Image: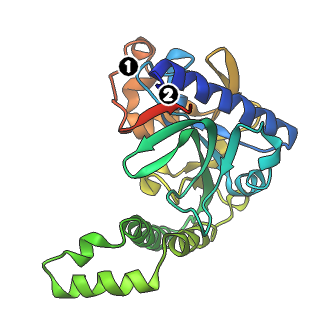
Amino acid sequence: MREISLKEMQQIELQLLIELDRVCKKYDLRYFMDGGTLLGAMCYEGFIPWDDDIDIKMPRKDYEKLASLSKEFPSHISLDFPSRKHCEYTMGKLIDTRTILIEGKKKTGVYIDILPMDGYPLDQTEWNSHLKALSRYNSLFHASLEGFASLKKSSSLVSRIKGYVYSFMYTPYSLYKKLVSIAKKYDYDESEFVGLLVEGNPEKERFEKSWLQLGFTLEFEGHFFPAPIEYKKHMEIFYGDHVTKEECYHNLPQYPSNHVHEVYWKD
């Protein structure tokens, strides 16, 4: 197998994004660049030089519609969503199956992340309760991926018992389904505030839906893709106001990727 360089990986991901954009336009599905992808579009009109992934987000209804459109993509591209047989992540992925990406114990191909957006309650008490429930099941989901090993090895007898009980009670997929059912409580299109509730940082993510308007795009690697019209405000929440100052656009502090993986072309 031949190793894939960072530049190659970025180009594979770009082609995946182009294909996703084509399908979303065909079926009138809403999506937006997010995270380091959006920051790269702002600062470099493309990838941040050291970044190794693409993140996009979609309103829940569009995300669920996309999940049914796997046959719309070329044969070497797989649309992968959590399922009963395969549930290692809480988001969808568009994967180039000609490649192999090894990330710890997980093995897939070069991919882009597709993250679903849901609504937030307006009432502060409801919001606190909502986030608490999401946090609980998010923690259980990630613990279930390791078979609740940390609980089973705890010095506390109560924690060890919990670990074994949870192993019988839960699977990653059952916990994922519970997370989704909680997140969908407040419909995206009926809510004033929206964001990523199942993955990421729900407390930081909350922003006004009016920040997302259809038809606004930013350049990314010579193409134009949808972005939040209030993208600067959105980025300030995560990276601070220094990233939205003109003098910092091409002098961005280096935020190293938190991904540790090996990437290869298949034989």
Disc number placed over residue 164 in the picture, else none: none
Q: In which quarter of the view is residue 213 placed?
A: top right
Gap in angstroms between the C-alphas marked 1 and 2: 10 Å
Measured from the top left, where is residue 128 in percent x and y?
Answer: 43, 69
Please report the residue visible at 42 percent of the width from the left and 12 percent of the height from the top: 250
Please report the residue visible at 54 percent of the width from the left and 68 percent of the height from the top: 176
Q: In which quarter of the view is residue 163 placed?
A: bottom left
Nearer the observer, 27 or 101: 101
> In the figure, 202 relative to 212: above or below?
below
**SS for callout 2:** helix
27 lies left or right of 146 = right
Q: Which image quarter is the C terminus in?
A: top right
Q: Residues within 10 Å of mark 1 (few under 14, many from 20)?
A: some
Labelled pair 1, 2 in contact (Cβ < 8 Å): yes
Measured from the top left, where is residue 197 in percent x and y?
Answer: 52, 59
> In the figure, 157 relative to 204: above or below?
below
Measured from the top left, where is residue 119 in percent x and y?
Answer: 62, 60
| Residue identified by numbered label 1 | 252
134 lies left or right of 116 = left
Nearer the observer, 65 or 70: 70
| Residue identified by numbered label 2 | 39
Please report the residue visible at 70 percent of the width from the left and 53 percent of the height from the top: 63
Which one is earlier in the sequence, the residue at label 1 or at label 2? 2
Q: Amino acid at mark 2?
A: Leu
Find the residue positioned furthest to the left.
155
146 lies left or right of 159 = right
Measured from the top left, where is residue 200 in percent x and y?
Answer: 46, 52
